[in-house]
Image (cartoon, grey):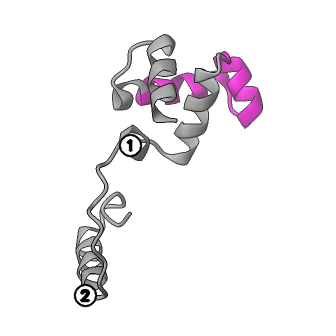
Amino acid sequence: MFDALGAIPWGERARRELRAAGETSRRRAPDARDQLTAHELQIVQLAAEGLTNREIGQRLYLSHRTVSSHLHRIFPKLGVASRAELRTVVSALR
């Protein structure tokens, strides 16, 4: 969590303290969800369900252009180039 926020020293300190307290779990490998904000995850879920940008915008109180802009940034983060690929990635994340 600290690492994702750019607070690397705090993450290292938290890991040291957890180890000192007996924690033995390994660091979880980041997945595609870790690259997205909560807002982006909402948009991804709705787009994967087949909603249009306009429909997503209406549900989230955004303009369809804002939704388009979000998707434009989301696609490279997930390594997809289409909504069909997006659906495949989202189903794999579930």
> Mark 1 — residue?
35
Residue nearest the observer in this picture, 4 or 26: 26
**Earlier along the polypeptide chain: callout 2 or callout 1?**
2
Where on the picture, by quarter, is residue 33?
Answer: top left
Residue drawn 30% across the image and 67% down it: 25
Q: CA distance from mark 2 to mark 1?
A: 29 Å
- The stretch of residues the image draws in magenta is 51-74
Residue drawn 52% across the image and 19% down it: 87
**Residue 79 spot, x, y in % from top left:** 33, 24
For the residue carrying disc 2, how many other residues have a C-alpha within 10 Å: few (<14), some (14-19), or many (20+)?
Answer: few
Q: Of the residues tagged 2 and 1, which is closer to the observer?
A: 2
Inspect the image, locate mark 1, and give the three-letter code of the amino acid beneath it. Answer: Gln
**Residue 88 spot, x, y in % from top left:** 47, 19
Instruction: From this view, report whether residue 74 is shown above or below residue 87.
Output: below
- Indicate yes or no whether the magenta region holds residue 66: yes
Instruction: From this view, report whether residue 16 is shown above or below residue 25.
Output: below
> Residue 92 got which mark?
none
Whether tag 2 and tag 1 are in contact, CB under 8 A, the answer is no
Counting labels gives: 2
Inspect the image, locate mark 2, and give the three-letter code of the amino acid beneath it. Answer: Ala
Instruction: From this view, report whether residue 52 is shown above or below residue 10.
Output: above
Query: Farthest residue in the bottom direction?
Result: 21
**Residue 94 spot, x, y in % from top left:** 52, 35
Where on the picture, by quarter, is residue 21?
Answer: bottom left
Q: Secondary structure at mark 1?
A: helix
Residue drawn 69% across the image and 32% down it: 62
**Residue 86 spot, x, y in % from top left:** 47, 20
Predominant SS of the magenta segment? helix
Residue nearest the observer in this picture, 73 or 94: 94
Residue nearest the observer in this picture, 32 or 27: 27
Image position of 10 (left or right of 34): left
> Mark 2 — residue?
20
